Image (cartoon, helix red, strand yellow):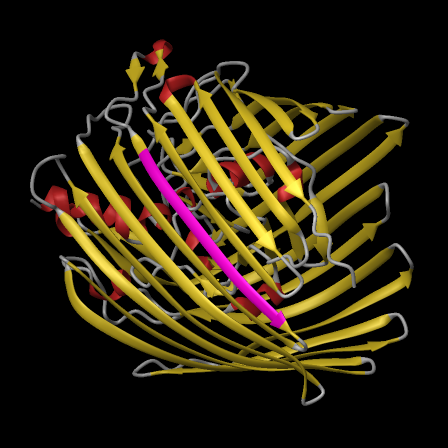
């Protein structure tokens, strides 16, 4: 019975998924494998647009797109299994996932499974890094992943369809419909995936048995605008039914069902007290059921609800832009391993930008209060200098914190009700050049974490969370793009590089599951309606234990995408892992060898005839 409980808490539903020390993994050398890339578009000093509706190629999930397109670590616990994004060596729970202004991070384990989120139904995904990402809330200690579906007005009728099939029993379908006029807009979308996920790796005699994935996603949005008012509501439903494959050495017959529903209502009023007024109400519900042996009794189950309310006012007075926000979050959660618990969180925050010639000052302050846990003030301050048109440099200092999750505090056996909130402070120096044909961004950072929560093994083999006194993270990130257009030829060279050094300040050893080096490189060649895009990704070794004795080897991946667009019709082909190399994102969890998919897209767009 202890093995079952430990498996649930360790693998699926606690922060132990990615922050734990696992069984030592013997050192070995991997060969080569693959992954994808699209053009990276920088939108602001602290943000990176990694997916937009104009990219053409439609990924299945946010986890797939992030692992393929960015020089950051996506911790995927097996093909199609639970996944999260790690920025600057931080746990995945330190990245806040925001959907149309609503936080999706779970009160149970503090994170969002990125393989639960459809990328095909999302108009745009933006990644915020560094100090100013703390404005997205206490969960954004390392950054924020923001998914937006902006409603368009007077856009006419647009219908989009996409079908895909591929190796290992992959079947996927997507349908999106948008209708808008001068004052109103409606958007409906849904997709489904059925994937046998039964890939084979003959070199080690491995078959990914009992790994079927079934997922369904539905989204809806309605908006109405009149004069200075905009009313809009968004709805999202995610469902996944996954059979969990074994490792290289174990056989699994487990099954995991997860469900998530999010809703928000948003009213915006322009020209209100010399600024803009925003009021939003939202609700997020989630549940899971886990079967240690499919078809038998439930071994683990839980559910949580998160109700959010926000009122904000932003104004613009000459060179000064300022805003003040009040947020209220009420969350509750329970599972088979702990009884119902409730938390209420009040947040009052303010931020301002002031422009003077080629200097801009940024600042923000956040005050938060919840019962029984003292929360220090947090905020950020920075300055940006633009000495000439295309170049700017910024210095930013920020502080943030994060409350322990319900699993951290109350999971039985193993929870620790005496955990302290995690805190950090970070310095960042950013250089950026942006022009029509050349773009680059280089950021260096230094961060100190206090009371970082880590799940560690204890007596009897059970895991429990503890506070680490002090950890230190430092490194730099580079992203760049070079674009050239000659006649009908368009060439885009994109690259990203990450170096991160994250250590336990007490022992001086690197934190486990934190690769020091990652990079991506892609070349997109397009002529008329044709395009070809080869891409490389590299992830260095990382240690799998606190003593820095055992490590997972480096990964070098090669992928290829190609496509053709003709009027309303499109066809895309992707060949993954072209060199058919064995690799694992997480130790013991094999990923597929060479595989291919083909997708067909058909879009219809009737533009509005309204005249203004």
**Residue at 71% across, 46% down:** 41
Q: Viewer-proximal residue, 42 or 157? A: 157
Farthest residue, direction bottom: 273
Q: Does the magenta run of residues contain 227?
A: no
Residue 113's place in the image compared with 130, above or below, is above
Q: Position of residue 141 (x, y in %)?
A: 50, 63
Picture residue at 44% right of the left edge, 32% below the top: 173
- 413 with respect to 365 (left or right): left
Instruction: Residue at 49%, 14% (x, y): give it.
Output: 580
Residue furthest to the right: 388
Q: Quadrant of the C terminus?
A: bottom right
Give the residues in magenta. 214-225
Residue at 10 percent across and 35 percent down: it is 295
The image quadrant of residue 268 is bottom right
In the rendered image, the vertical position of residue 5 relative to residue 557, given as above or below: below
In this view, the residue in front, 41 or 521, is 41
Q: Is residue 222 magenta?
A: yes
């Amino acid at each position: 019975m202890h093995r079952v409980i430990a498996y649930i808490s360790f693998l699926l539903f606690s922060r132990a998924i990615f922050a734990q020390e696992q069984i030592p993994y013997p050192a070995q050398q991997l060969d080569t494998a693959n992954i994808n890339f699209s053009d990276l578009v920088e939108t602001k000093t602290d943000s990176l647009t990694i997916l937009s509706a104009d990219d053409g190629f439609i990924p299945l999930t946010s986890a797939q797109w992030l692992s393929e397109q960015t020089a950051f670590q996506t911790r995927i616990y097996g093909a199609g299994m639970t996944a999260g994004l790690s920025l600057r060596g931080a746990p995945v729970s330190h990245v806040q996932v925001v959907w149309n202004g609503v936080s999706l991070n779970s009160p149970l384990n503090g994170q969002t499974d990125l393989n639960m989120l459809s990328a095909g139904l999302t108009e745009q995904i933006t990644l915020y890094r560094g100090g100013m990402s703390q404005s997205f809330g206490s969960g954004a200690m390392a950054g924020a992943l923001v998914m937006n579906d902006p409603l368009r007005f007077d856009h006419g009728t647009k219908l989009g369809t996409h079908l895909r099939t591929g190796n290992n029993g992959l079947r996927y379908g997507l349908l999106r419909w948008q209708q808008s006029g001068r004052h109103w807009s409606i958007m409906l979308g849904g997709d489904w995936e059925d994937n046998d996920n039964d890939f084979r790796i003959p070199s080690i005699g491995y078959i990914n048995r009992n790994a079927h994935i079934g997922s369904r996603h539905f989204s809806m949005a309605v908006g109405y605008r009149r004069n200075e008012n905009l009313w809009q509501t968004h709805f999202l439903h995610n469902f996944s039914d996954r059979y969990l494959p074994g490792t290289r050495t174990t056989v699994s017959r487990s099954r995991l069902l997860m469900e998530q529903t999010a809703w928000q209502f948003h009213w915006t009023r322009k020209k209100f007290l010399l600024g803009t007024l925003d009021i939003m109400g939202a609700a997020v519900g989630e549940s899971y059921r886990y079967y240690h042996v499919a078809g038998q009794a439930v071994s683990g189950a839980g559910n949580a609800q998160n109700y959010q309310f926000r009122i904000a006012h932003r104004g613009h007075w000459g060179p000064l832009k300022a805003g003040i926000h009040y947020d209220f979050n009420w969350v509750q959660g329970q599972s088979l391993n702990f009884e119902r618990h409730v938390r209420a969180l009040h947040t009052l925050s303010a931020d301002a930008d002031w422009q003077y010639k080629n200097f801009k000052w940024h600042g923000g302050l956040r005050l938060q209060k919840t019962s029984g846990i003292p929360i220090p003030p947090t905020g950020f301050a920075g300055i940006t200098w633009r000495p000439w048109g295309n170049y700017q440099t910024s210095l930013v200092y920020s502080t943030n914190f994060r409350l322990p999750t319900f699993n951290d505090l109350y999971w039985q056996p193993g929870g620790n009700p005496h955990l302290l909130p995690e805190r950090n402070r970070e310095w960042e120096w950013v250089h950026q050049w942006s022009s029509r044909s050349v773009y680059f961004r280089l950021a260096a950072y230094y961060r100190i974490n206090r009371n970082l929560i880590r799940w560690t093994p204890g007596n009897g083999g059970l895991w429990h969370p503890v506070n680490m006194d002090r950890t230190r993270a430092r490194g730099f990130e580079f992203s760049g793009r070079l674009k050239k257009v000659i006649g009908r030829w368009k060439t885009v060279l994109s690259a990203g590089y990450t170096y991160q050094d994250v250590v336990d300040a007490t022992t001086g050893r690197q934190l486990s599951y934190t690769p020091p080096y990652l990079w991506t490189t892609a070349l997109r060649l397009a002529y008329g309606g044709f395009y070809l895009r080869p891409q490389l990704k590299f992830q260095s070794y990382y240690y799998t234990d606190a003593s820095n004795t055992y490590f997972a080897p480096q990964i070098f991946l090669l992928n290829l995408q190609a496509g053709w667009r003709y009027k309303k019709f499109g066809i895309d082909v992707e060949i993954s892992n072209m060199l058919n190399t064995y690799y694992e994102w997480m130790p013991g969890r094999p990923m597929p060898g060479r595989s291919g998919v083909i997708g067909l897209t058909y879009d219809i767009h009737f533009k509005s005839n309204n005249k203004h």
